Image (cartoon, rainbow, N blue to C red):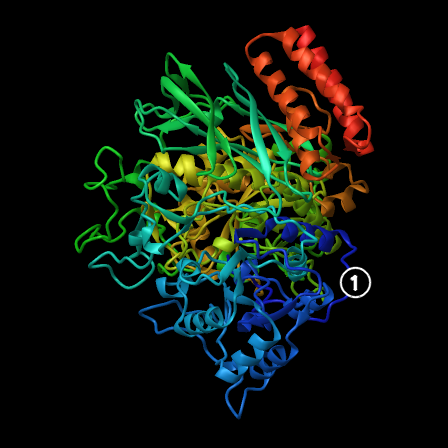
Amino acid sequence: MLTATGLALGLAVTPAGAAPDDEGVAVAKAVSDEGIVLLENDAALPFSRGAQLSVFGSTQVAPFLGGGGSGSVIDAGGVGFLDALRGEGFQVNESLAQRYETWWNEGLDGGVPGKEQDYRPVSDTGGTFDEFGINSVARAEMDLPSDVLAQAGDFSGTAVVVIGRNGSEVHDPGLGDLELYPDEREMIDAVASTFDEVVVLFNTGVALEMGFLDEHESIKAAAVVWTPGQAGMLSVADVLSGDVNPSGKLPHTIAHRTEDHPSTVNFGDFVKPGSEPGLDKYYVQYEEGIYVGYRYFETFDVPVQFPFGHGLSYTSFERDVLDVEHGPDGLSVTTRVTNTGDVPGKEVVQVYVEAPAGELEKPAKELRAFAKTDLLAPGQSQLVTTTVDTYGLSSWSEERGAYLLDAGEYTVHSGASVQDVDVAGSFRLSEPVVIDEDPATGARLENRFAEAGEGLTVLSQSDPEGTAPTAPATGTRTVPNTSPRGSGFNAQGSGNPPGFLNAPDAMPVLVDGNRIALAPGQTPAEVQLTDVHADPTRMDAFLAQFTDAELVAMHLQGGFKTIGLDRLGIPATAATDGPAQVKAPAGSGQPNGTGFPAASMLAATWNTELAHRYGSAAAAEARALGVDAWYAPGANTHRNPMGGRNFEYYSEDPLLGAGMMADVVVGAGQQGVTTVVKHFVGNEQEQNRQGVETYVSERALREIYLKPFEYGVKAGSLGIMASFNRLGETWVGATPELLQGVARGEWGFDGFVVSDIWISPYMNAVSASAAGTDLMLNIPVPGYDQQGLADFSRALTEDHERTRAALEANTRRVLTFVMTTPAFSEVLGSAENTTRALDPAALPFSTSTELRRDVVDLADLRQAFHRYVEQEQVAGPLTEQMTAALDAAARHAEQGRTDQAVRQLERFIGRLDSPARQLVVSAEAKERLSNGVAAVMQALAED
């Protein structure tokens, strides 16, 4: 959505200061610590303490710390990249750094300063970004004369190159923006030819093409540092030094080329031939169907640069699947993760399921559960159990109008990325399982979105060539929008006469733009909102007290607020924007909140506990700013790398997005602040977002695009923002099948729906009210929208009963939210109302962990012993005999010869007590190995 609080290019860069100590900044730092993704590393990282570094790339001077638009980060302070390096003890090439600083701020030799250069490729090869979003998609690059390169090469054999890209609301990057620009390629080629060791950092809000990493042998390491918020550059420096061990994993695929994504041919600007100028002529077709991201690349064997879920560490891990169980309630997988390296680290367990093709074709693999370990010390293990319910294993059947598990063999894969997996086990269903009721609400399921899939050909494994996505041909969808709901019957600007609500004094006067005060001589109503809070059965009587004009005012004045009515005891509430930073309400004079990392970086942590902390910290800041509802988080999908707001959304995978979404919602809700999950639904591109007709199959809509919203709602969110686009020809905000049928009917949503910002003719308020959009997000200007009043004047005149009933339903849902807010707490004189039902277990999967250092079986014992030998905590001539004893014990145990296995273990323990000249053993190793042998011998005896 558009934000009314202003926008910024990024964070102001300030000198390095003390470590973060408040909760918001501490959480921001924790997210950026765990969200950095180490893509490749040929023993280049971490750098040694005090290493000399020559840093290239103008983004070092002006890093992208936040995106543009709603997801921007404004005036939050922050530590710059070079200051973070200096603070971590690195020796920065100050001559080179000063040259960049001078060029950026003042220009060199009378030239234009870098910050004033418009670094946009020509319009037919790349994107354009105006002042609403960000000044440019990338920074201009400084020329590198030979003497500058020579000085840098003399200073250090190691170079760090920072490549920057950003994303923004309103604009999508073009194909040219996702490649290296010519100046960047020249810089890379020059640096890679000068230095023996080059490390590339991607300071990006979008997914760049990275093929150049393979073109130079001197490029030894690369990492994605995202747009990391105000503490992010401290995290980058910590990762480079090794103080932080990277544990991030990619939340989307890095393809070799953007064109490799099947959605690319149907992303952008498509016009219905013969359309009249206006907002009813654009459309986009999701012809790739369910094959988004890795679902496509894995199924159709298309090579990628870096797969979904990929991310390296400075340590190594061994993953042993101990148990795979399937029953009526779903699938459970227990994995032992052991740190087999030299430094502490975290790992992510990713569970994928390969489902059989039956009534439905399936992707090669689908993520069905994930969990992140604690920080594991070398040699330490953790048991991770992930459980997936049957609903979480299912796929949508358009033929049945229900979720379905086909009969057949299901193969379970577990590993560290979608490609780095091993077969963990399998299970078989002898009969198909049909789920025709929502498991959480019991509501009946059915097909609801035939209009959205009308005339759509979707990619299929049965005919990959014949169904391959193609750009729309001339003549496709030639008929302009003809749906009364789609165009908005009597929409804004349609010429309705002003009507009685536009008459002088017809509408109540707004005080301070957000409250209707008692009129002279007016007395409070008999039933107050506090009475409804005490006795919900009085809601109908309460609503009957509203005048038509008051109900219309409640509906039309929904921009960053809900209005108060003194007569009825309704307080005004405040809402604010900013998924990466809670913005202070306009005109409040208060500072904005913490500049958090972008949503993609949060998803890259794969850490739902961090998502909960982020939601809680952001909401605590919202409460301090007097905010009751937070227009966040963004739940849309990384359908294509050209999505301008991908940085503001979590992932290409619906489950990863849902996992982040649910915990953010719960964290915020526990602070008494409701989230307004957005943009519901099908708003995966910014180009033509106002009114674009989105055509998508019901299966793809339900399996991919609706899932993060579903679990945000089921976790307890009381707000949804309806997006600008249409589903088929009908605006989302006027689609009862979506708002009433799915959200309220199937998922049990009992909160409010607010439109995206109300600036377009097709967003008809009467149609919105009838369909279940409860608030119009009006531009915060004095007075009422005259066309909205005209439309309601006509509707109330022609069908008063139906129109008023819709308005009362809208107000009922808004008041359900109001009664949970801190604003209403002030009316009650108590904060008990902000405690409401939240469900952190709403997800279709759950995780339990058990941190272990104890040796419990022979595999543990052998692993621990070899680890101690490598660390030289066990050393001496007897180590080979002890190794042989453990190997023999394992063979005997596998063959059922328990007595022989025990004798070999006794031989091993006897050697452990040998004199120092034959064996040196640390106290830790001796205690742990002795206890381990005892535990294993007891287990063998019990077997």
- Position in image of residue 48 (x %, y %): 67, 60
Residue that appears at 71% across and 65% down? 50
Q: Helix or strand or loop: what does disc 1 sit on?
A: loop
The one nearer the camera, 838 or 563, is: 838
Q: Is residue 537 visible?
A: no
Q: Which residue is mark 1?
A: 18
Vertical side of 483 occupied by 52: above or below: below
Q: Quadrant of residue 493?
A: bottom left
Q: Residue furthest bottom?
A: 110
| Mark 1 residue type | Ala
- Position in image of residue 154 (x %, y %): 59, 77
Residue that appears at 53% across and 28% down? 844
Vertical side of 843 occupied by 719: above or below: below
Q: Is residue 236 left or right of residue 265?
A: right
Residue that appears at 75% across and 51% down? 23
Q: Residue furthest left?
A: 475
